[in-house]
Image (cartoon, rainbow, N blue to C red):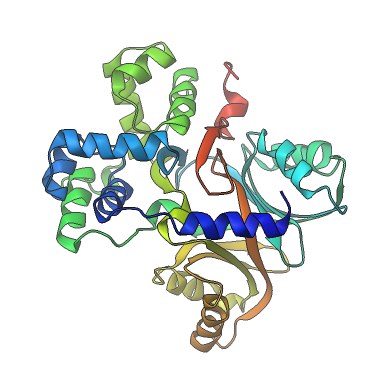
Amino acid sequence: MNESSTVDAINSASSSAISEDELALVHALQVQPRATWTDLADVLGCTTVTASRRWQRLHEEGIAWVTAVPGARCAAFTAFVRLRCAAGHREAVAARLAQDPEAVTIELTAGSFDLFVEVITADLAAFTQYLLARVEKLPGVTQASVAVATHVVTEASRWRLDALEPRASSALADAAHPRTTRSSERPTARQLSELDLRLLTALGADGRQPWDRLAGTTGTSAATARRRVERLLATEEAALRCDIAAPLFGRPVTLSLHAQVPASDLAATARSLTALTSVRFVATLAGPDNLLATFWLRSIEEVHRIESELVARHPAVRVTDRALALRAVKRMGHLLAPSGRSTASVPLGPWAGQNPLN
């Protein structure tokens, strides 16, 4: 598919209607990805059967899905690789990288580079090996530049559709994080067992699968599967997030800004960006650029407004590069159609690399 047909597909997908009830359901699952059908029905004002039926359609058609991703305390190494490709090779390179657990997110981009790849590995040594032995040796790759994440300030599990009333959203959040649990009482993370890795890999494909089905997939009991998963989430080794086919939800434009910020202003600038409703991801970087921010926008016309607002709020910020995603090929392990729909999933690094079943 060429760039023109990719844009046409995105524009066509963005015209598909998602009902207000479906928007509210997805927002609810963004707040609490494994909420029970009873909890969801109470918040949404429908029956449990209706809530289940709506989700089944969204999930089966690849419109929305729940997946497990590395959490804030996951022992992992994150880097962003920008690739230049020989003419006519970018789609082939993207397709080959899409099957790699390490390449968790891949976008075809318009800008100073052709592909934007988020890579997650167990550590620096594993990343270096992956970059040198795999990425840079792929036929068609002509240049690679790397930025290492020093701190992920916000990520997509915290992004919301803004389709629920604040009271309903708060009720679900309280159910997900009881007030009796304080950060100081968070369980201590442990070295992941083979069962933990199997559970996380299975939840990467379908984060809402019932406990008994998850148990059957991973070779354990439902009670053990639930206990292990709840501990992984409580220690923030992993997180669950409800993701969407962005063009179908009126967010067809993905913009990534790379910037240089004075070291003394970096933390405050990064935190302030998290207040913007269009922000999906913010990270500080080690490299020539020290800030990366990704936005989901409703139209191309918003691109310059976002950058202007950023510079107006923070005059010391210097935007060094901007990339517009022509198409997302993969997002956090899920392979995507040009419409943004999930079509399949690939086990996610760093867990997949340690998993004896992969």
Residue positioned 47% across, 58% down in the render: 14
Residue positioned 82% across, 41% down in the render: 132
Q: How many marks?
A: 0
- Residue 195 is situated, as x and y percent measured from the top left of the image, at 45, 18
The correct choice, above or below, for 250 with respect to 45 in the image is below
- Residue 326 is situated, as x and y percent measured from the top left of the image, at 65, 59
- Looking at the image, can residue 6 be seen? yes
Residue 60 falls left or right of residue 308: left
* Residue 319: quarter of image: bottom right
- Residue 143 is situated, as x and y percent measured from the top left of the image, at 85, 54
The correct choice, above or below, for 72 with respect to 153 in the image is above
- Residue 334 is situated, as x and y percent measured from the top left of the image, at 54, 38
Which quadrant does the C terminus fall into? top right
Residue positioned 59% across, 17% down in the render: 356
The correct choice, above or below, for 274 with respect to 59 in the image is below
Camera-side residue of 31 and 154: 31
- Looking at the image, can residue 187 be seen? no
Residue 247 falls left or right of residue 29: right
Camera-side residue of 253 and 184: 253
* Residue 250: quarter of image: bottom left
Camera-side residue of 52 and 318: 52
Residue positioned 74% across, 36% down in the render: 96
